[in-house]
Image (tube, rainbow, N blue to C red):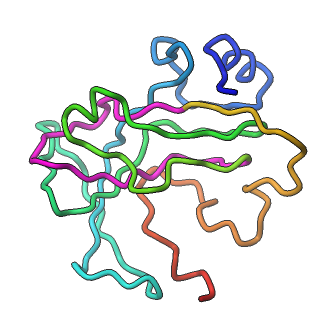
Amino acid sequence: MILSDKRILEEIDKGTIIIEPFKAECLGTNSYDVHLGKYLATYKDRVLDAKAHNQIEHFEIPKSGFVLQPGTLYLGVTVEYTETHGHVPFLEGKSSTGRLGIDIHATAGKGDVGFCNTWTLEISCVQPVRVYAGMPIGQLIYFVVEGNIEKMYNTKDNAKYNNKTTRPVESMMWKNNF
């Protein structure tokens, strides 16, 4: 079951969902709009290695915007910091974003109960498109969890994305044993 706008507000009042900054006009019927932060990043190397710590370079989006190019993976970040203590958050692109040919995540649209951070976006595009810091980029929807949680994400020793950040975070796949 997906939470409605009224239910999202109730959960915010209870403290089980935190969105900072929160703006009422960003609340949809059953979602909350999130915005592109001012930082993007790209990987330094063209060939990435799943067992290596692939380094990224951060840069700030100029006021005039930045043109994304096809064939390049950009890491972005949401303006909004969120915490979800009783629901499963999903980040999806807005239809207006998709109609510009922008994908905001390659595979990682689901957060875990206990995720407390900004969202790193895995941005790609099908043709060159100019983006701007602060533009609506996606929407969060919240699902009810069935059953009790044994260990929240923010309390796991092996949680790789727990450090609070305002910049995109590179893949931490290299921390896995395989």
Compare residues 65 and 138 and report the one nearer the observer.
138
Tell me the residue at 77%/28% (across/down): 15
Q: Is residue 118 found left or right of 134 in the rendered image?
A: right
Magenta span contains residue 134: yes
Q: Is residue 162 above or below residue 116?
A: below
Total marks drawn? 0
Residue 2: image quadrant is top right
Tell me the residue at 36%/30% (across/down): 94
Magenta span contains residue 7: no
The stretch of residues the image draws in magenta is: 114-140
Compare residues 155 and 97 and report the one nearer the observer.
97
Residue 84 placed where, x, y %? 69, 39
Q: Where the N terminus falls, by quadrant? A: top right
Tell me the residue at 53%/13% (across/down): 29
Q: Is residue 53 above or below residue 158?
A: below
Compare residues 127 and 15 and report the one nearer the observer.
127
Q: Is residue 80 found left or right of 6 in the rendered image?
A: left
Residue 71 placed where, x, y %? 17, 63
Tell me the residue at 44%/87% (across/down): 52
Q: Is residue 152 found left or right of 115 in the rendered image?
A: right
Residue 74 placed where, x, y %? 28, 58
Residue 99: image quadrant is top left
Q: Is residue 103 found left or right of 177 in the rendered image?
A: left
Q: Where the C terminus falls, by quadrant? A: bottom right
Q: Is residue 50 above or below residue 31?
A: below
